[in-house]
Amino acid sequence: MENDNLELILRLSAFFGIFAIMALWELKSPRRPLRSAKRFRWFNNLGITFFNTLLLRLLFPTAAIGVALYASQQQWGIFHQVNLPLWIEVILAVIVLDLCIYLQHRLFHRVPMLWRLHMMHHSDVDLDVTSGARFHPIEIVLSMLIKMALICLFGPAIIAVLIFEIILNAVAMFNHSNVYIPVQVDRVLRRFIVTPDMHRVHHSIINQETNSNYGFNLPWWDRLFDTYRAQPAQGHDQMIIGLQQFQQPQAQSLKWMLRLPFKGRGGGYDQ
């Protein structure tokens, strides 16, 4: 129980800390003007975030950390079969899990049924700190099940899973944020981490750009698997964000987002 409470405190502290930093940064130095009303988008994006958090706690009370603990007790996974110093295991585990998230992201673009779920994330017509947690509840549950399976397969240390979870949440808020970073600084940063300018290309209305820059944390996978695009064709100021078929204002409402996977057209997935 104490470990569960500590994990929750660490994750919530990291979430609210990074959220506050990025929200203030957006306010002080925005990258692009927003197209839709911020208060309306924030209410709905944060609403779905709150709902997803409660849903995961209800369905998976111990979440990924609990699975990592059980895998450790049962000696499941590749890392339990090799004797590595803890610090090396943590680094390797974070890198391996990040690669898996990249591949999962591509899968959700590639498979039409999964794309229908993932469309909710891409239907946002603006990008800011709240966009990083705008996912359909069914996708969130599927992602957690995939993550649990990966933990059983690889058997990373509990601390590695906790660090990975915190990093993933933090960089999702960072690289979805509407913040201005000088081009020279961005050019250096994107060698080591996915930057907002790099990830913004992935949210372009142009399909070829939507199906690029899948990385969330480490930028290396897009270069390695030839899915990297340096800049949007229309430039960051002129590019249109979102999906062609879902540009209407009502597409930002909570009710509409929840119903999106069951609507008529999917379209736009990675063909």
Image (cartoon, grey):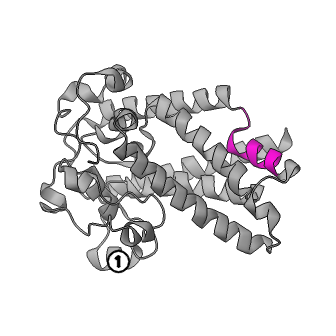
Specify the quadrant of the image occupied by residue 117.
top left
Residue drawn at (20%, 28%), measured in percent from left and top?
Answer: 249
Specify the quadrant of the image occupied by residue 219.
bottom left
Residue drawn at (22%, 40%), measured in percent from left and top?
Answer: 243
Specify the quadrant of the image occupied by residue 116.
top left
Does the magenta run of residues contain 66? yes
**Magenta stretch secondary structure, dominant:** helix
- Percent across and percent down for residue 235 are 15, 63
Please report the bounds of the magenta region as a residue range: 61-71
| Above or below, 121 relative to 254 | below
The residue that label 1 is drawn on is 185
- Percent across and percent down for residue 98 are 54, 60
Secondary structure of the residue carrying numbered label 1: helix
Q: Residues within 10 Å of mark 1 (few under 14, many from 20)?
A: few
As drawn, is 74 to the left or to the right of 177? right
Residue drawn at (24%, 22%), measured in percent from left and top?
Answer: 264
As drawn, is 96 to the left or to the right of 212? right
- Percent across and percent down for residue 63 are 69, 39
Residue nearest the observer in this picture, 62 or 170: 62
